Amino acid sequence: MSKTKIANQNYSLKNFDTIPMLKPHTPLLDGVDSPADLKKMSTAQLQQLADELREFLLYTTGVSGGHFGSNLGVVELTIALHYVFNSPKDQIVWDVGHQAYPHKILTGRRDKLTTIRSQHGLTAFPERHESEYDTFGVGHSSTAISAGLGMSLAMRYLGKHDKVVSIVGDGAMTGGMAFEAMNDAVQQNADLIVVLNDNDMSISQATGGFSKHLATLWQRGLAVDIDKNGDAIFTKRVISSEDRRIRHYLHMANEALDDWTSRLPNKIVEKLAEKGIPKPSQLETLPEKIANKLIDEVFPENLFKAIGFQYFGPFDGHDVAKLTQIFERVKQLQGAVLVHVHTVKGKGFLPAECDPITYHAITKLKKINPAQEKSVPVDSQKPAPTPAKKYSQVFGEFICDKAATDKQLMAITPAMAEGSGMTEFAKRFASQFFDVAIAEQHAVTLAGGMATQGVKPIVAIYSTFLQRGYDQLIHDVALQNLNVMFAIDRAGLVGEDGATHAGVFDIAFMRTVPNMVIACPKDENECYNLLNTCYEHIGPSAVRYPRGNGIGAEIDKNQAMYPIGKAALEQTIEATGEGASNVAKKVAVLAFGTMVKTAVTACQNLAETYPTTTFFVYNMRFVKPLDSELLDTLLAQNCSIVTLEEHQVMGGAGSAVNEYLVAQAAKTSQALPTLINIGIPDKYIAHGSPEQQLADCGLDVAGVVKQMQTILS
Ligand SMILES: Cc1ncc(C[n+]2csc(CCOP(=O)(O)OP(=O)(O)O)c2C)c(N)n1
Ligand SMILES: CC(=O)[C@@H](O)[C@H](O)COP(=O)(O)O
Ligand SMILES: [Mg+2]
C-alpha cells in the first residue's frame, strides 16, 4: 500500500526574501473580483495565482502592517477553499481570522487591502458587516467550529443543503471550545467540515511547542489519503515507538490470520464463498483490511477519529491541486469531517519561515522611495529619543525583579508570553513559568489551584481574553479568597485590532466581585509599584494597564507599597480670575489610570476659560476599594465631580463613584453634587490608531474639555 505522499513536489512555489515596496505585477489576481473567477482557472493557473497572491500580500502588509506569517501560510488553502466551495452560500468560517487577508483579497477587497486595520479601512478580522463572505465575526480564538456547527444545524432545520467549512489553526485547537464543539458536532451527527491548519505554531514559543504535543497526539496512527477515484485509502504512517509495538502485535495477528486462512480446507472455503466470504486467494488484503479496521476501531490513535470525526490527512497545505482534490471529495460526504493540512507559518518569505513568532505581525514598513532617501537632511539623522517603556515591558521587569528574591512567584500566560512581556522571565525562571496555550479558563483555575498550595500565582492576561475566564475568576479564585494576582494587559482601547480586542469591560465585570482589589496605575512607575502592592496583598487582586508605551515616567524600583484604596491629589489648578476669593466653583476630577494625564491637561486648558474655578485632579489609583474618605470630603465640600476612565462608562469606575455618593448622600441627608462620568460611550469603538479611537469616543483632551464644559457653563 503506497504511503501518502505528504509532500507532493509536483509544483514549485516562489520564495521571497524581501518585502516589495512597489505593487507587484499580478495579472491573474487582478482578474479575481470574486471566488467565481477562480472556478474558470486551471490547476496550473491556480498555482500561479498563489505565487501572485503571496507577493501581493507581502506588498500590502508592508504598506498596512498587521498580521503576517499566518496569512502567508494559508495562500494555497484559501484559494482551494474558494475554488471548491461556493461561498457565500457555502459558509467558510475562519478561526481567529488573523489569517483571513487572502480570503479578503479573493472576495472583492483586493484593492482595499492596504487599508486593513486603518481607520475607516478594512477590519483586522472577518466581520459580517464588511462582506457577505465574512460569515462570522472573529478575533477571539477557538470559536469557528461552534459557529460553523450552529450554521450547519440551522441549515439542516431550514432544509438548506449548503456546506459549512471551519478553518482552525493548531493553536486555536488548544482552546477548549474547539473540543466542546467537535464533541457536539458528532453527537448531533451534523454535516460539518473542519480544516485543521497545522503549522506547528501558535503565537508564542511555548504554545507552539504545546500544539506540537497535540499534533503528535493527532498525527499518530493512520494517514487517510484518497485514491484517484476519490476513495479513502488508509496508509500507514511513521508512528511513535509505542504505536510501533501495537503495529507489531497487529502484524503478528495478520501473520496468524494469513497462516490460518491458508490452511482452510477447500470445502469450507466454498461454504464461506456461498455466504459471500471471499476465497483465501482473495483474502490476501484481509489482514491489511482487518489490521486497519483494528487500528481504526480498536486503536483510534488519531485524536479526531477518537472523537468521532471522519479524518483525512495530513496533506501538504501548499499543494493547491491536492487540496482541491481533497475538498472536492469531502464535499460529497455527510457527517463531521476533519481535513488535516500541514502548512508553514510565513510560507514563501524566508525571514518569517525562520522566525514565525516575530513575524506573527509586522508594523507598517517605512515607505521611503529612493529619491526621498538621498534628500533626507543630515540633522534628521539625530538618534530618535528613546521611547518610553511599554507597559508589558514594565510587567516583565517586575516579575523578573520579584522572582529573583521570591521563589513563590508563579507566572501563567494563556499563549501570549511575548505580547505580555514574559520572554525574559520564561528564560530565567523556567520552572516558575507556565504557558498553558489558548486556554484562558484553565489558566485562571490553574492559578487558583496553585494558590491553595501556598505559592503566589500571577495570571498575565489581556483584558479582552480575561472575559473568557470570568466565571473562573469568581468561582475558582475570588469566592475562595485565593491569593492570585491578575496582571491585566491591553486594558482600554487597543487601536488597530479594533472592537474584538478592546479591553473595556474588565472594571465592570470585576468590581462587583467580592474580595477583589482593582488597581489602575497612571504611568509606568505606578504600574511597577502597584503590581508590587497587589502581589504582596493577601487575596485576589488585579492591576489593569494599557497596550503600548508609558509616558516616560522614571521607575522607582524600590517596590513601594501603596495604601490600598487610597487616592492621591495629582494637581490643583487654582482659580486665578477676579472675585476668585469667593471661588464660584470647585471641580474635583477623579481620574483612573492613564486618564490622569489627560485630566490634568484638560483642566489646565479649562482654567483659562473659567478663571473663577478651581480644579482638583485626583489620581484614584484603585477602583476597588474606592477612597471613601476622599468621596465623603468632596461630598461635604459640595464639589462638582467628574469621573474619567478609559473603560465603558456604563458599569465602570464612574458608576462605582456614583453608587457610593448616592448611598452616602442619602445616609447623611446631603445634596448630591453636580456629577458627570466621562468614559467610553455605550457602543463599540471601531479600529484605528489609539489616538483616533480616543478622539472617536471623546477621551482625548479636546473631548474631555468639551464634556467638562457641560458642568462649567
Ligand atoms: C481567546 C484568544 N486568546 C488568545 C488570542 C491571541 N491569539 C491570536 S492568534 C493566536 C495563535 C493562534 O495560533 P493558530 O491557531 O495556530 O494560528 P496561526 O497563527 O498559527 O495561523 C493567539 C493565541 C486570541 N485571538 N483569542
Ligand atoms: C490575532 C490576535 O488576537 C493577536 O495576534 C493580537 O492581535 C495581538 O495583539 P497585540 O498586538 O496587542 O499583542
Ligand atoms: Mg498555528
Image (cartoon, helix red, strand yellow):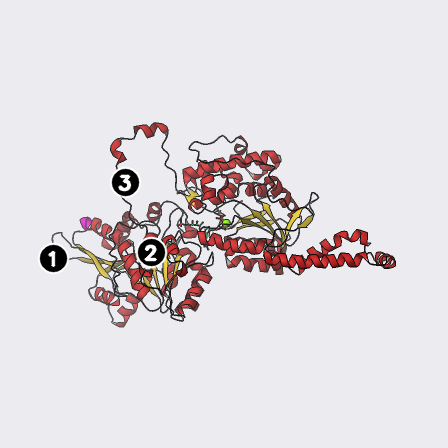
Q: Which residues are magenta?
A: 607-611
Judging from the image, what secondary structure is the residue with disc 3 in? loop
Which callout, 2 or 1, points at the residue further toward the start of the chain?
Answer: 2
Quadrant in the rendering for residue 434: bottom left
Is 242 placed above or below 366 here?
A: below
Residue 592 is at least partly visible in this image? no
Confirm or reject: label 2 Cβ below 8 Å from ligand 2.
no
* Left or right of 389 in this view: 95: right
Depth check, front residue: 21 or 567: 21
Residue 581 is labelled as 1
Label 3 within 8 A of ligand 2 by Cβ: no
Q: Which mark is residue 395?
A: 2
Residue identified by numbered label 3: 384
- When asked about the image quadrant of residue 632, the answer is bottom left
Asked if residue 608 lies in the magenta stretch, the reply is yes
Residue 116 is left or right of residue 544, and the answer is: right
Q: Nearer the viewer, residue 384 or 402?
A: 402
Q: Is residue 665 above or below residue 556?
A: below
